[in-house]
Amino acid sequence: MSLSIQTGIIAEASSDATFILLDAVPGHENQLRQALAAFPELISSIQQQFPDAQLHAAVGFSSHSFERITKKLKPKELAPFPSFSGEYLSVSDAAYDIILHIRSNRHDATHLLALTLFRALAGRVTLKEQTNAFKYLDNRDFTGFVDGTENPQGDDRAVVALVSEEDPDYQGGSYLNYMKFVHDLDKWEHQELKVQEDTYGRTKYDNEEYASDEKSPHAHTKRTSLKDEHGKSLEILRQSMPFGDLQQQGLVFVSYSKTPSIFDLMLKSMIEGDEQGRADHLMKYTQATSGSAFFIPTLDFLKQLA
């Protein structure tokens, strides 16, 4: 696989991350392209300052901004974030223009790279939202359950996450879906252990998944374990991380995939449920009102924006 891929897509999990959502300032697209073309060199220079920090970045554009900012035709499957409405949750498109996903094993390295890139865009973008996230215990969500247990491993990470021959102009890129879930931990922590485990379809402390015939149709693992017409599992690469302070705790959900259609199917299965309308009961204890969809091109693509 080309070294031109943005390393934040498939690198192994980090202990620290920041997610930055931006809108482009109208009328400044030419200057914005010049700044973005310098990103690969800026990223590399900060990475060299922290050689042991596993510092990575991913920069992407939504369907609302891709052609306006890059002056290129958008990737084949880049579309607005889907809208779904169910008994427990309804989501729609937040319609941001740009995402910066920066992560490492040192908060200072993450912060310095984020600050460097944001300053390079000064006057050309508006900061809409920034969320800092971190590894919690042994890769657990604030609900106490291990997150991302079904992630692809090794070379499969690239196979799942990176566009290949299906869109030759954008090989090595990836579709990113972003959601910010805020948990109702008071409600969750009042549930008995068995209720919590049944909600996930997995044991809490040993992290052992229930047998398929023992899972409730409302279990989170049931609603997100989908297969294609040939019985093959549909996979995405999750790079989600918890966030929290004294007032609010939750999960920044981020997935990378060579096609956004798999995430769309999973989200529909969670929110709207199956043919009988059986939705994901984990949604009783968390809330996300919107999401955002982006495409992460290669570093070479960014360089050519100059």
Image (cartoon, rainbow, N blue to C red):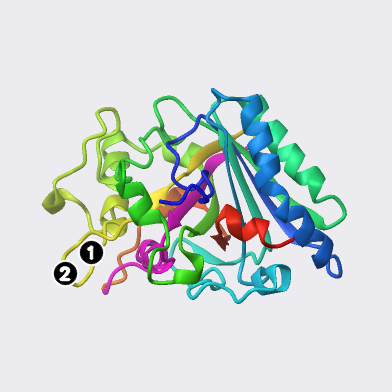
Report x, y in % for residue 12.
42, 36
Report x, y in % for residue 212.
15, 52
Q: Secondary structure at mark 2?
A: loop
Q: Provide the residue designation for mark 1.
A: 227
Look at label 1 and name its amino acid: Lys
What stretch of residues is rendered in magenta?
Answer: 248-275
- Does residue 139 show up? yes
Residue 25 in the image: above or below residue 158: below
Report x, y in % for residue 113.
69, 36
Residues 175 and 37: in front is 37
Residue 301: quadrant of the picture? bottom right
* Magenta span includes 251: yes
Q: Provide the residue designation for mark 2.
A: 230
Residue 99 in the image: above or below residue 186: below
Separation of disc 2 and disc 1 at Cα? 8 Å
Say which of marks 2 and 1 sits in front.
2
